Image (cartoon, rainbow, N blue to C red):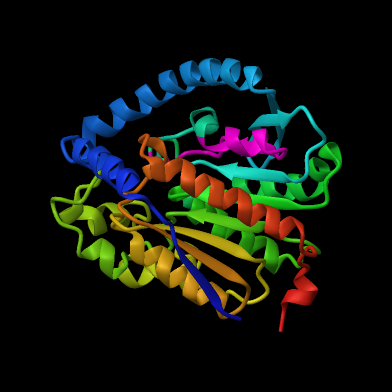
């Protein structure tokens, strides 16, 4: 196999606009997942999710996308899905796993990132997986099992509901990390079909890759000098070697028998090496494409830079290419 690498082309005006967005982000407080800041963020997350869901549902309806909610059976009770359906018969089903550092975020807050897929004739199911919460005893493994359940539904009942034979999973940041772990579990279950994967600025090594370790105080969004420490809080009780185990860091997993994948990497993202290294490892076993986005910080799709729409157009083209190819089975993918 080989890795196909693209650099997102930007005009001088587009690059200037993207740098202007970055200059604004440089003035924003850095994310620090501790103390009252995290508690406040969790409360604010709930309020914003409800408000954003109502606003974007109305906007999407005007664009011909129907938004609804549904619950499927999950490992700890009902698992909530946010469904975005085009007016035409869907060409495929996309399972969306939101970002948010494993502790915030929601399906409703991702409407801006998934609406363009529904407008392009794809059904979207965004998953409200359990967020990590030490007080409630919710850990990484719980979030992964929720995502596995959602993908099982998508490959079975979900595909039948929408009348499609292709399923994709798209995850951003923490969602990309969970998507990789979930697809690996499905691979180990010897599923006949696996969803093609789209990983947007994923975090694949919880012991911190070189670019994450090298992050400085100027790193956008994150508390750069303490980024490795903050990753360590996700897996209490594990040392650095333990955080490299494949059950939490998919970069170190056996990647044989996996479906095609698209990786999105940002030039100004401290987790840039995660996407680069994971795409290289994936390409040794299955077709992989890497899109390098100039100027892009972590989460760039949320901030209004022109790179967001351009990257989303690339994602749609990649999906179109995959839909023109034959579905990948585990049996055919394994050496």
- Viewer-side residue, 124 vs 97: 124
Q: Is residue 192 above or below residue 118?
A: below
Q: Quadrant of residue 292?
A: bottom left
Residue 195 seen from this side: no
- Measured as percent of width and height from the top left, residue 334 is found at 72, 79
Number of disc labels: 0
Q: Quadrant of the N terminus?
A: bottom right
- Measured as percent of width and height from the top left, residue 101 is found at 38, 44
Q: What residue appears at the point 47 percent right and 41 percent down from the top-left corner?
A: 309
Q: Is residue 94 left or right of residue 106?
A: right
Q: Is residue 81 above or below residue 223?
A: above
- Measured as percent of width and height from the top left, residue 152 is found at 73, 50
Q: Is residue 116 above or below residue 54?
A: below
- Viewer-side residue, 134 vs 219: 219
- The magenta stretch spans residue 120: yes
Q: Quadrant of residue 46?
A: top left
Q: Quadrant of the C terminus?
A: bottom right
Residue 41 seen from this side: yes
Q: What residue appears at the point 83 percent right and 46 percent down from the top-left corner?
A: 164
Q: Which residues are magenta?
A: 113-134
Q: What residue appears at the point 78 percent right and 44 percent down from the top-left corner?
A: 91
Q: Is residue 148 above or below residue 112?
A: below
Q: What residue appears at the point 66 percent right and 35 percent down from the top-left corner?
A: 118
- The magenta stretch spans residue 96: no
- Measured as percent of width and height from the top left, residue 261 is found at 59, 63
Residue that sits furthest to the front in the current view: 12
Residue that sits furthest to the left in the current view: 217
Q: Is residue 103 left or right of residue 124?
A: left
Q: Quadrant of residue 105?
A: top left
Q: Is residue 232 left or right of residue 69?
A: left
């Amino acid at each position: 196999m080989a890795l196909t690498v693209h650099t997102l082309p930007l005009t001088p005006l587009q690059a200037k606009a993207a740098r202007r967005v970055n200059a604004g982000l440089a003035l924003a407080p850095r994310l620090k997942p501790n103390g009252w800041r995290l508690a406040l963020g969790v409360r604010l997350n709930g309020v914003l999710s409800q408000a954003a869901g109502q606003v974007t549902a109305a906007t999407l309806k005007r664009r011909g996308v129907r938004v609804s909610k549904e619950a499927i059976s999950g490992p700890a009770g009902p698992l909530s899905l946010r469904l975005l359906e085009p007016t035409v018969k869907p060409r495929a089903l996309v399972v969306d796993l939101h970002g948010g550092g494993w502790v915030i975020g929601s399906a409703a807050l991702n409407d801006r990132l998934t609406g363009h897929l529904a407008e392009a004739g794809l059904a979207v199911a965004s998953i409200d997986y359990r967020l990590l919460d030490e007080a409630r005893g919710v850990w990484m493994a719980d979030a992964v099992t929720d995502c596995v359940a959602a993908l099982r539904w998508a490959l079975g009942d979900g595909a039948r509901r929408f009348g499609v034979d292709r399923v994709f999973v798209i995850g951003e940041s923490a969602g990309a990390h969970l998507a990789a772990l979930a697809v690996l579990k499905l691979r180990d279950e010897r599923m006949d079909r696996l969803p093609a994967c789209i990983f947007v600025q994923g975090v694949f090594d919880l012991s911190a890759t070189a670019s994450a370790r090298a992050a400085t105080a100027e790193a956008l969004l994150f508390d750069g000098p303490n980024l490795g420490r903050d990753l360590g809080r996700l897996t209490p009780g594990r040392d650095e070697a333990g955080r490299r185990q494949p059950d939490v860091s998919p970069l170190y997993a056996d990647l044989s028998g996996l479906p095609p994948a698209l990786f999105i990497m940002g030039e100004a993202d401290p987790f840039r090496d995660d996407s680069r290294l994971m795409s290289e490892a994936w390409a040794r076993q299955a077709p992989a494409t890497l899109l390098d986005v100039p100027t892009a910080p972590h989460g760039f799709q949320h901030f209004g830079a022109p790179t967001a729409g351009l990257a989303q157009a690339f994602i749609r083209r990649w999906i179109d290419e995959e839909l023109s190819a034959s579905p990948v089975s585990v049996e055919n993918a394994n050496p």
